[in-house]
């Protein structure tokens, strides 16, 4: 069984010791079933002790590319696999975030230290204490919690729930791995687009998607899926 | 001497980076600082035109990088201020002509000689932006008071933070107070609400800019008009003076003619 974890640098796919091809097939079915969760993301592979050839690694890269996912690092406890991955230009550690993505607006979180902000990572959730700006993408298989505003043009994509302690503008996708019970809460819920599992709803609360209009003061709200439609209710009503 | 490197950039093109670089550079020079303005927009050079120094270019920064001249030979002395120099760039080369490491090295060499180095950077979405960001001690982001420009500025602020070059400061350029009052244009407060970034200056729309650009006479050199005074305020804030932010009436007789009042 492969498993998927959320890291500051993107997603980490952890393999086990079973044959490479069967694991790749499993990865493919995960990518296939959750294509909008993965689309545009960057992935690191933890291949444990598997001995892999350049051909086998490139096959994984090609597979990921088909789903618009970039492979940037390969972690391995096998000397020869390590060497091969290195030759192909993959990073062999997660410590240095992939600099080639620095211009691309993908979330790296080295900015977390720059602003003196703390970010806690784990498989259950991603906690971000700062403003998420236009072009930045937070992606996590678990929940995403942002303490700060999410600006127009930013994107949050969570396998679980999304909670924004601030004003949520931009795009938020909860339950992006298929969980239709996921929800989105914000102190001010004014995104240009929200999605829960496969349902979508645009320009929430009748606001222009640009989000630059001076806002009236709003109450905390939450969005949930009910009968395949996204409903928004004031916080206290539950 | 150990210069402060100020990189001026934006989210997208055409918002006034070159205008701001020339004028902030001139305003610093008027304050008796030794200043080099550096054109970082390789292949699209126009800082020399705005400065009115186009005809004096013999060597440029790419000539220096490729060993065809010394740095001193590429620097053009602007006699209109006590100590103001322009380092022009090549017109016929692409952004790859100067690498990030070479730009850092070039600035390190300049640092010894100057108080301020002001770099006219390409916009954040363009190639060459990271080259101009790398040597920066301070980053100024130019935005116009309109939604798309602010959105792109937000993106660049994020990039600057992720390169640990933050916190950037903001120049709001081409503001027309009358249009803000009529709610046709974003106010400074609207912009700060989205960007939560410190504003170092608000430059009003000023028709003197167009004339001064055409004549190669930056407004900050003769000191007249609302934009000129805004640039002087920015320069004084840069050198650490505590100058209160004021949003000046724009000088837009054209606007007044078109919209009835200014
Ligand atoms: N404050 C201003 N008032 C009026 N016109 C301006 C102002 N700032 C810039 N402009 C004009 O806007 C245009 C673009 O400016 P420029 O500095 O070349 O932008 P950039 O370097 O960002 O592409 C020029 O024609 C310039 O004269
Ligand atoms: Mg320019």
Image: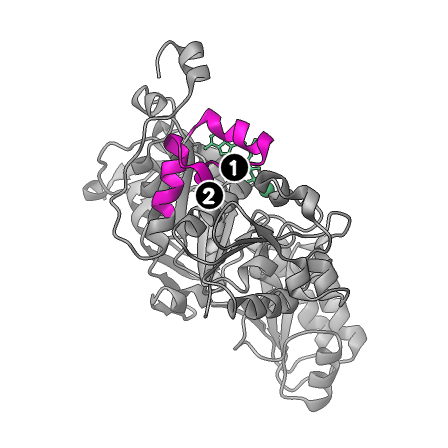
Tell me which segment is drawn in magenta. B205-234
Q: Quadrant of the C terminus of chain A?
A: top left
Chain of the residue under the numbered disc 1 shown in the image: B
Chain of the residue under the numbered disc 2 shown in the image: B
- Which sits earlier in the primary sequence, circle 2 or circle 1? 1
Q: Are marks 2 and 1 in contact (CB under 8 Å)?
A: yes
| Residue A149 coordinates in the image, percent (x, y) | 33, 49
Return the residue at label 2.
B142
Q: Is residue A174 visible from the viewing direction of this image? A: no
- Kindly identify which numbered label has been placed on residue A61: none
Mark 2 Cβ and ligand 1 under 8 Å apart: yes
Return the residue at label 1.
B15
In the rendered image, the vertical position of residue A24 relative to residue A218, given as above or below: below
Q: In the rendered view, does A234 fall on the left or right side of B249?
A: left
Q: Residue furthest bottom?
A: A79
| Residue A115 coordinates in the image, percent (x, y) | 36, 64
Q: Quadrant of the N terminus of chain A?
A: bottom right
SS type, badge 2: strand
């Amino acid at each position: 069984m492969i498993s998927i974890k959320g890291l500051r640098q993107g997603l980490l796919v952890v393999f086990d010791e079973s044959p490479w091809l069967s694991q790749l097939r499993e990865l493919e079915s995960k990518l296939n079933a959750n294509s909008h969760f993965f689309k545009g993301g960057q992935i690191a592979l933890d291949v444990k002790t598997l001995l892999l050839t350049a051909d086998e690694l490139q096959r994984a890269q090609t597979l990921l590319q088909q789903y618009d996912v970039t492979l940037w690092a390969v972690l391995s406890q096998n000397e020869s696999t390590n060497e091969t991955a290195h030759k192909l230009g993959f990073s062999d550690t997660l410590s240095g975030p992939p600099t080639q993505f620095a211009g691309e607006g993908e979330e790296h979180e080295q900015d977390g230290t720059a602003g003196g902000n703390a970010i806690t990572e784990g498989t259950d959730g991603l906690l971000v204490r700062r403003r998420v700006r236009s072009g930045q993408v937070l992606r996590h298989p678990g929940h995403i919690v942002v303490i700060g505003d999410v600006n127009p043009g930013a994107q949050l994509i969570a396998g679980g729930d999304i909670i924004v302690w601030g004003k949520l503008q931009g795009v938020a996708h909860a339950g992006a791995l298929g969980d239709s019970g996921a929800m989105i809460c914000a102190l001010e819920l004014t995104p240009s687009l929200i999605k829960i599992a496969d349902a979508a709803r645009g320009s929430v609360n009748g606001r222009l998607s640009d989000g630059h209009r001076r806002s009236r003061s709003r109450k905390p709200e939450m969005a949930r899926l009910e009968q395949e439609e996204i409903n928004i209710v004031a916080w206290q009503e539950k | 001497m150990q210069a402060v490197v100020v990189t001026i950039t934006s989210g997208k093109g055409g918002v006034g980076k070159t205008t701001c670089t020339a004028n902030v550079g001139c305003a610093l020079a008027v304050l008796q600082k030794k200043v080099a303005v550096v054109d970082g927009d390789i292949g699209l050079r126009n800082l020399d035109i705005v400065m009115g120094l186009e005809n004096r270019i013999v060597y440029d920064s790419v000539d220096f990088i490729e060993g065809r001249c010394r740095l001193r030979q590429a620097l053009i002395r602007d006699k209109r201020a006590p100590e103001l120099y322009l380092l022009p760039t090549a017109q016929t080369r692409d952004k790859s002509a100067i690498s990030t490491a070479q730009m850092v090295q070039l600035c390190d060499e300049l640092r010894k000689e100057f108080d301020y180095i002001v770099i006219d950077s390409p916009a954040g979405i363009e190639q060459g932006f990271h080259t101009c960001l790398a040597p920066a001690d301070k980053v100024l982001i130019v935005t116009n008071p309109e939604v798309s420009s602010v959105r792109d500025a937000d993106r660049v602020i994020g990039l600057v933070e992720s390169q640990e070059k933050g916190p950037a400061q903001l120049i709001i350029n081409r503001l027309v107070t009358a249009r803000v009052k009529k709610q046709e244009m974003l106010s400074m407060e609207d912009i700060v609400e989205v960007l939560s970034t410190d504003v170092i200056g608000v430059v009003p729309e000023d028709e003197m800019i167009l004339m001064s650009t055409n004549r190669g006479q930056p407004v900050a050199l003769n000191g007249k008009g609302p934009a000129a005074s805004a640039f002087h305020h920015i320069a004084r804030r840069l050198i650490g003076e505590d100058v209160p932010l004021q949003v000046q009436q724009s000088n837009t007789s054209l606007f007044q003619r078109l919209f009835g009042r200014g």
